[in-house]
Amino acid sequence: AQRAVKIAMKGLAPKPKKPVEADGLKIDSEPAKA
């Protein structure tokens, strides 16, 4: 889960997309909580 979050963060860093960030955070938060 940590690796996925790091990849998502790196991918979102260069792409300042609000919808993508919200989706990535929600997806990362779900598995991270589990």
Image (spheres, rainbow, N blue to C red):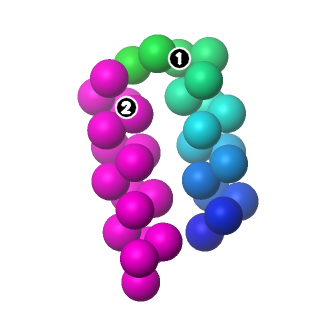
Residue range highlighted in magenta:
18-34
Q: Residue at x 37, y 31 (%)?
A: 20
Disc marking residue 29: none
Q: Splitting the image into 4 quarters, where does residue 21 fall?
A: top left
Q: Are marks 2 and 1 in contact (CB under 8 Å)?
A: yes
Q: Mark 2 to mark 1: distance in Å?
A: 9 Å
Q: Which residue is mark 2?
A: 20
Q: Which residue is mark 1?
A: 15
Q: Is residue 24 above or below residue 28?
A: above
Q: Residue at x 66, y 64 (%)?
A: 2
Which quarter of the image is occupied by the N terminus? bottom right
Q: Amino acid at mark 1?
A: Lys
Q: Is residue 32 left or right of residue 30?
A: right
Whole-percent x, y for residue 17 in the image: 39, 19
Q: Is residue 21 left or right of residue 19?
A: right
Which comes sooner in the sequence, label 2 or label 1?
1
Q: Amino acid at mark 2?
A: Val
Q: Is residue 19 above or below residue 26?
A: above
